[in-house]
Image (tube, rainbow, N blue to C red):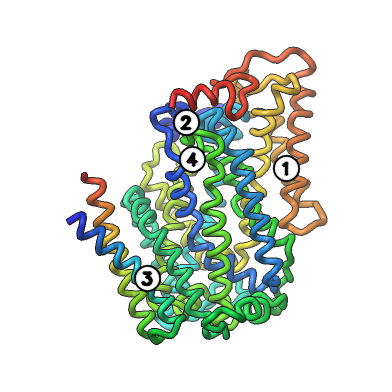
Amino acid sequence: LKRVAVAASLLSYALCVASPLLYFFDRIDVDAYKTLLAVGTVGWLVFATVWSGQRDTT
Amino acid sequence: VADLARLASQMDRLYEFDREPVTPDKLKSFWRFAGLYAGEHVAATEFVIGAFFVLHGVTAAALIAGLLVGNLLAVLSWTFICAPIATDTRLTLYWYLRRIAGPGLTLLCNVANAILYCVLAGAMISVSATAVGLFFGVRSPALSAVLPPSTGYVVICLALGAAFTTLAILGFDKLSRFNSICSPWLFTVFAAGAIAVMPGLGVQRDLSNLWEVLSTRVWNGVPTPGQEPYGFWHITFFAWFCNLAMHIGLSDMALLRYAKRWTYGVTSAFGMYLGHFLAWLCSGLMVAAIGREMDPGRMAFEAAGWAGALAVLIAGWTTANPTLYRAGLALQAVTPDWQRWKITLVAGIVTTILACFPVFFLKLLDYVAIYGLVLMPIGAIVFAEHWMFPRLGLQPYRAATIGRIFNWQALIVWVGTLVFCALLPIHLFYRWLPGYVLALVAYPALARLSQGSGPPSPRLRRGHADARPGTGRAKADEASS
């Protein structure tokens, strides 16, 4: 579970970082950027919380 | 005096857990401090402060130069003023001040701190309210507003205040952990919002006209009507004193006493240059993109969508929560026998009422200046007693030696410095520095008058009288760690 949480949180974080850059360089439109950022946000807040909980129990 | 002694004793019990100096096995690494500072200084206030610089019409060059210099001065203050005393004594400011100023003055200092914390937490609730208001069609207050702009705004502030207070009562530790999870994400939302608004402001994809856009459409030197124009020195001093209570005021002794070396004070640069440089620049870009309207919720929503609005809400919450906790802790001293939940509830109610008045977040820059100013003389008193007294042949820690409730010299210097600062005919941002110098001179002078010119008594603190960072006791600590 810990590995999944780590991978999912890092992926979510990467989505948060990449989405504005993709929008700035005109690869996606503004709605797609905001959606990707929202998805990345939810992913990070959920999986990083799980990751943090796992780290404390191990 | 008997009542005061009883209250002081009550307060001592609250802080009992950190009464002893930190032992070598508890010291933390350099990178731990870097992470702590980086997380602590990317908060809800950044959404407001960076935006206000745009409204005050600072130029791009003055802003960047001012932030670089001011933040450097702040880092140097942490490194050369706060960290050496923290690593030398390994005590919190509370316990060190208690030796110097006596339990009575320490109590007063705590109550002042609690009131200031409540106002700050209230401002954070107001900031969060601007994000929640978006979903209910409640307009944010105008820039000059003092009173609540609408019933809807009051209802949102009351609801948020109730929620934040409940969460503060239920679980401070869990929220602290959640805060550490949010910090890197919050910084990303700041950066994402700034990057995303650039095309709308006219920045080319190859960034070829970036500077031109920044200096003509964002920080163009034209203040919003009703706002005082700011220049290089305003920005420099603001960046320097923004955390005055923490570095010059020595509150961060609580943190830096865990540092292996005094040089760990430089880790504050991670907080300053990520939070008080990049995040401020990012919020400036975002407010320019919405036509320079001071509305943190709408600003973040326009720039980063739902994630932006959520960032404002969560940033307000995670900033207000520890502030509420600290206010409760400080106030608990004057409410003997009250349980923690009850005093946190009272602090929460006061904070929530304050949050309904938008003036506190709309005057945040001035409030930050006053907050630092009020606690600055305490830092000067401790600095003088720690470093100057041994060299001047003065006996330190007289309050502890004689068993005084009040160190009257410290009280006179504290109040006198504040009166002096209030009367100074210069801008609010610059007043603390002459006040600090005055306190550094006046406190040893009053001590000399009180003590006469007799020989000093042996030192009471752990370290040697001449202990300097990297020498004496501090070196022994490093070796043992």
Q: Badges 2 and 1: C-beta atoms under 8 Å apart?
A: no
Residue B52 in the figure: left or right of residue B300: right
Chain for numbered disc 3 = A
The span from disc 3 to disc 1 (Cα, nearest Å) is 44 Å
Say which amino acid is labelled 2: Asp
Say which amino acid is labelled 4: Leu
Q: Is residue B260 above or below residue B77?
A: above
Q: Residue at x 53, y 62 (%)?
A: B45
Say which amino acid is labelled 3: Cys
Sequence-first disc among 2 and 1? 2
Sequence-first disc among 1 and 4? 4
The span from disc 4 to disc 2 (Cα, nearest Å) is 19 Å
The numbered mark at residue B255 is: 4
The percent coordinates of residue B344 (x first, y second) are: 41, 49
From where the camera sits, is residue B341 visible?
yes
Q: Residue at x 65, y 58 (%)?
A: B68
In this rendering, the label closer to the viewer, 3 or 4 = 3
Disc 1 is placed on an element classified as helix
Chain for numbered disc 1 = B
Chain for numbered disc 4 = B
The span from disc 2 to disc 3 (Cα, nearest Å) is 46 Å
Q: Which residue is mark 1?
A: B436
The span from disc 2 to disc 1 (Cα, nearest Å) is 28 Å
Q: Quadrant of residue B455?
A: top right
